[in-house]
């Protein structure tokens, strides 16, 4: 497994487009995994969960296999049915570096012209 992870890391480092696609899918797979784990922990079948959220079993199967991304409203219904709390948040990818406070080029040029 370590060799696979090393190979994947190398591929992601070498190909920025692949990394963007991989990162974009990470959230979808995490959601699918969380729903599956909670459903199993609660001892529910896909059919039982589907009935609790007023949908069909194949819809739950698609969500758990990450073939379908549920809306926020559906995620809230799933969270309620699974006796879980839905947490959604945005995090910055990279913080912007602090800007230095200094006179800009325009201010320096104006000072030079006016003197």
Image (cartoon, grey):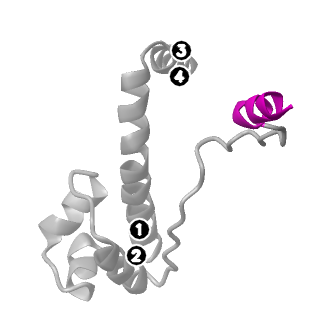
Residue 43: image x %, image y %?
Answer: 40, 76
Eye-nearest disc, 3 or 2: 3
First in sequence, mark 3 or 1: give its number.
Answer: 3
Give the residue number, with chain letter if any, for mark 1: 40
Residue 2: image x %, image y %?
Answer: 57, 20
Q: Of 37 and 8, which appears nearest the observer?
A: 8
Would you say residue 109 sits in the magenta stretch? Answer: yes
Badges 1 and 2: C-beta atoms under 8 Å apart? Answer: yes
Give the residue number, with chain letter if any, for mark 3: 3
Q: Residue furthest front?
A: 115
**In the image, what residue occupies the spot 84% across and 38% down?**
102
Range drawn in magenta: 104-115
Eye-nearest disc, 2 or 4: 4
Q: Quadrant of residue 20?
A: top left
Marks 3 and 2 sit apart, C-alpha to C-alpha, by: 35 Å
Marks 3 and 1 sit apart, C-alpha to C-alpha, by: 30 Å
Give the residue number, with chain letter if any, for mark 2: 43
Give the residue number, with chain letter if any, for mark 4: 5
Q: Label 3's element?
A: helix
């Amino acid at each position: 497994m370590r060799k696979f992870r090393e190979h994947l890391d190398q591929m992601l480092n070498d190909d920025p487009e692949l990394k963007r696609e991989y990162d974009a899918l990470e959230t979808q797979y995490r959601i699918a995994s969380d729903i599956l784990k909670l459903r199993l922990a609660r001892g529910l079948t896909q059919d039982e969960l589907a009935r609790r959220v007023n949908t069909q079993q194949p819809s739950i199967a698609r969500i758990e296999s990450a073939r379908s991304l549920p809306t926020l409203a559906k995620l809230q219904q799933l969270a309620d049915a699974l006796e879980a709390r839905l947490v959604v948040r945005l995090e910055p990818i990279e913080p912007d570096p602090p800007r230095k406070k200094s006179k800009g080029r325009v201010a320096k040029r104006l000072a030079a012209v006016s003197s």
